[in-house]
Amino acid sequence: MGSYFAYRHMAPFGNSSLLTVDLGQQYVDFFAYFRHSLLHDPSGIFYTFQKALGGEMFGIWTYYLLSPFNLILLLFPDKFLPSAIFLMTVLKYGAAGLSFAWLLMKSKLHPGFSALIFSTSYALMGWMIANQLNLMWLDAVIILPLIIWGLLKLVSVGQIRTYVIWLTALLIINYYMAYMVCLFTGLFFLWLWLSRWKSWATARRQLGRFVMGSLLSAGIAAVTLLPTIASLISSKAQYTQTNWHFKFEYFPPKMLAKFFLGSFNFNQMPKGTPNLFIGSIVLLGCLFFFTQARHSVKTRWLAAAMTLMLLVSACFEPLDLIWHAMQFPIWYPYRFSFVISFWLIWLAANALQRDFVPKLWQIGLVGAIILAGVAYVWFNLKQFSFLTQNQVLIGVLFLVAAMCLIALPDKASWVYQIAVISFVVIEMTSNAVSSLNHISYVTQSDYQSYYQIMTKQTHRVTDSDKSWYRLTPTFMRTKNDPMSGQFNGGSVFSSTLEKDMPTFMGNIGQPDGDGFVAYTNGTLLTDALLNFKYLINQQSTNNPTLSQSAVQSVSTRQDLNSYRTKTTDGTITTFQNPNALSLGFMASNQVLALHNTTKDPTQYQANLFAALTGQQKDQHLFTAANFDRVVFQNIKQQTKLTGAFLQKSNFIKPGVITFYFTPKTNDAYYLTLGSNLNDDNVTMTLNDHTLSQYPTYRHTIVVNLANHQKGQQIKLQLTLKKSSLWLQNFTLYQFNNAQFESSLTQLKSSQLKNKRHTQRSIQGTVNVKGSKRTLMTTIPYSSGWHVKVDGRSVQPVKVAGTFMALKLTPGHHNISFSYWPPLFNLGLLISALSLLACYVVPRWRRRQ
């Protein structure tokens, strides 16, 4: 694999990289955060304000960052992380092969070089190739053979140490994949336990050791498992499926196509069938297992039942849902299929012993099964976009050659061993090359140039201003830019994002999803309330450095001219927001009783602001405005715009609708756009320039069209990409700048003055005056926050379904916030007791 990556010029061997899809859009930024936390700021291990508006980090660490291979990242500067990822990837490939070879040698199945046949098939199986970009999952592939080796020792000699050590390691490294491995381990033990049944007394002891060892592993890992559970309850667990559909997700024989070489492409990532490629020799070997008399009839029937259950799990919705912890995957379906491949390779390793020479009837039976599978795929080839006739023919040639090699009688000679190993290496490498050639990658220079530009701009701000604030650019490489750039932003992409955050962001008109938020559509109001003190704007897309690095402009902010210019560098300008409030400020008690149910993001913002100021007039900060003139080109005339369905008159010609208005004041003007008005359906320009916008959103968003442009004509043009378009929630609003700034002055009069802050603690003072006795903060509410007022613990309240607020008495107060992961102390106690039991119980037994 290292040779292939070098041939593809992957860094450090060229300008390409392994960054693609989530590895390039998500994980690499977490890796940068990992480096920064361990080397510079350990306070960010438990909590960070670089995750959206702020969020716990335990779930991210236990899902993405606890692999011991990640320590390699500490040896590479941030801009060279693609090279570190290359090294981690090839080492994980190697470790997967090593662990499976270890299993085969220690179990005496293949004590010699023949172990390489199966370990190579395991390390380069189709699942591994398809999911190499999900680096955090690969540790499960590495550790699974070691857990099975421990299970074999548990059953055969009654020793549970190996099983406990490796199961504990996986539970700590990645709880998600460990869950799948635990399910498979239970099935494997059941097969092993029943097939080796001697007596009830022996079986009872084996079952007791298995249960005790499993519980002990969970107990030792409790220090990470319990805080992770607390994290999941507020994030991923909120999306658990409760509706069951007893149906097959596709016609089961379709998975046969995945046993052919190169059966993977980009379209298989979001929605495809399980990646089951294991190579010709192994595929034939697992079929031969069921024909061998050396394995008892009971063992073979049990193995057949387990094989059937695993394969049905890969196409029957309820079982698929169970394997994925009751949540359907978003991209990368059938993530558990690596255990199916492991099982098939394990059966093949048991079947293809040195002394095995298949009889004619065995060859005929296995050959007939293979022929039937090939015939099905060949006659239904149009259903498989990832397969061609040449791939099927090459696959058949490999199968024929593999059958000939298996049928040879002299398997002990070194010539035969080298021939078979070479055959497996060639076939598995061919599959890897043909599969990975279908994927495009981010170049090393793109990654480095953007990183250098972003860090240069953000460090200018963070080096000159050490106070607490948030910062956001109007362009991005990924939604995790704040985590790699080490600044408090408003965006994130994470599977463990708390559900309250996308709910709030969607309510105020920002793009959001179940696992991401992007603060790209701020208004003067939200910038002030959420403490966005600095905004970095790409003024033109003509910057050659930025265009080469494929930076995506995601925000149009005409209202930035209300802010002060702090620095300017070519086409990038940093603005300072004079209206940005502190992280905490005194507000009206009305906010404690706020029930903000409107679906209009402008009204939601106004209602929240009015509840904070206590002034009802602030509910009308946004007022609907009209366009002066609308011009339809090749579109049927409409009198009412909001909610209108636009239809082309001539489907061949372009359909364009142009809106004109001239602001009569210097107020800001905002346009709301429903989720239908996205990049797939329409192209928008503002004053003949592209209207930059994050491309996908599921709720109504707010776009700024004008500010301080009194008397200047504004032109908005929509070009239909399809024959029709729904103007969903398409409304123009005028914002009352003067009233907003007047009301904001009241909130600015008594703010939390920050004295000290880290990622997980904030200390400050506040002076409570008059009737405003609620300290409103923009710290997302969490049970992990512990608050003290003048040294006494107080219980914060949840406001707007998202933030923390405190009820205070008049006077001067010292406030401290500190975050500690929920259930961490309990988990630590259970882990300590479990480790103590590992030490005490064996010694007590020996003494007895």
Image (cartoon, rainbow, N blue to C red):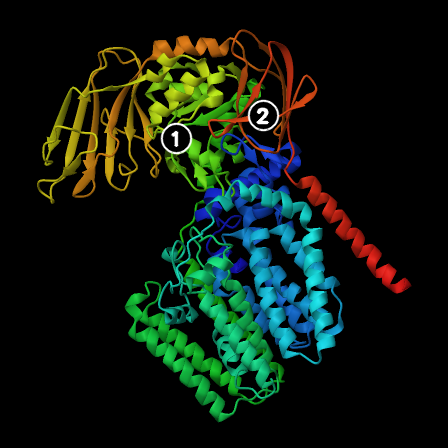
Secondary structure under badge 2?
loop
Q: Residue furthest front?
A: 593
Secondary structure under badge 1?
helix
Q: Residue at x 69, y 21 (%)?
A: 792
Horizontal and vertical percent for residue 428?
49, 68
Displayed quadrant of residue 346? bottom right
Which is more N-terminal, label 2 or label 1?
1
Q: CA distance from mark 1 to mark 2?
A: 23 Å
Residue 796, disc: 2
Q: Is residue 59 above or below residue 42?
A: below
Label 1 crowd bin: few (<14), some (14–19), many (20+), radius 10 Å: many
Residue located beneath label 1 in the image: 507
In this rendering, position of residue 490 left or right of residue 102? left
In this rendering, position of residue 319 left or right of residue 184? left
Q: Residue at x 58, y 38 (%)?
A: 57
Of badges 1 and 2, nearer the viewer stands 2
Q: Residue at x 61, y 65 (%)?
A: 185
Displayed quadrant of residue 100? bottom right
Horizontal and vertical percent for residue 169?
67, 54
Which residue occupies the foreground of this view, 436 or 202?
202
Horizontal and vertical percent for residue 800?
46, 27
